[in-house]
Amino acid sequence: MQRLKERRIRIASVRLAVGLGTFAPLSEENWKRKQLHRERFSMPSATASLLNNPQGRIIAVGTTTLRALESNLREHGRFQPGEFETSAFFHPPDTISSIQGLITNFHLPGSSLLMLVAAFSGTDRILPAYKKAIAERYRFYSYGDAMLVFA
């Protein structure tokens, strides 16, 4: 983190209350209601200000962060500080406008997390990346390898 700061890359935080639902399989009800489990998050005023006035790309670290940022932006039209909950389920053909890049791990097929990554970067870009990851024997899931994805 220090090296990033030395390069004048600004870092902002969001507090996430990640629930076990993150790892739950998708149900028919999720697709019908376009909702997942509820997760709480909070955004400090300094973070909202930085995100509303970026001086470069916004890169989210993790899909739970992306879900929180996109939910906040969609609900308020711009990033708002405060305590929030989201049950939003983003998947193709949804478009993601809150970020320009995402650092995330390789998620399991059919998971809401993979659907969110595909909504952000496009299925046509993510599927080839996953095929290469499998061919190269990358590690999947929470403690596996990571990738930097752009829209």
Image (cartoon, rainbow, N blue to C red):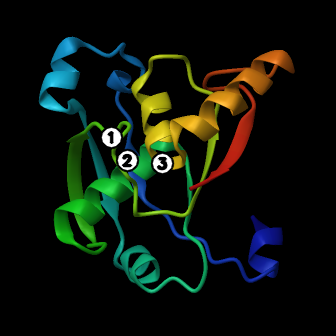
- Under mark 1, the amino acid is Phe
Residue 24, by quadrant, is top left
Would you name the residue on which mark 1 appears? 90
Residue 11, by quadrant, is bottom right
Q: Nearer the viewer, residue 118 or 87?
A: 118
- The residue under the point 44% across, 51% down is 66
Find numbered disc 3 in the image and state the secondary structure of the residue it sits on. helix
* Tag 2–tag 3 contact (CB < 8 Å): no
* Tag 3–tag 1 contact (CB < 8 Å): yes
- Mark on residue 120? 3
Gap in angstroms between the C-alphas marked 2 and 3: 10 Å
Find numbered disc 2 in the image and state the secondary structure of the residue it sits on. helix
Quarter holding the N terminus is: bottom right
- The residue under the point 42% across, 80% down is 46
Q: Nearer the viewer, residue 43 or 131?
A: 131
- Under mark 2, the amino acid is Arg
Q: Could you tell which of marks 2 and 3 lies nearer the N-terminus?
A: 2
- The residue under the point 34% across, 78% down is 45
Q: Position of residue 41 (x, y in %)?
A: 31, 52
Q: Nearer the viewer, residue 92 or 145?
A: 92
- Mark on residue 67? 2
Find numbered disc 1 in the image and state the secondary structure of the residue it sits on. loop
- The residue under the point 19% across, 33% down is 34
Query: Left or right of 140: which side holds 114?
Result: left
- Mark on residue 59? none
Q: Residues within 10 Å of mark 1 (few under 14, many from 20)?
A: many
Q: Position of residue 20 (x, y in %)?
A: 36, 22
Question: Where 123 falls versus 16 (above or below)?
Answer: above
Q: Residues within 10 Å of mark 3 (few under 14, many from 20)?
A: many
Gap in angstroms between the C-alphas marked 3 and 1: 9 Å
Q: Position of residue 38 (x, y in %)?
A: 22, 35
Question: Where 117 falls versus 133 (above or below)?
Answer: below
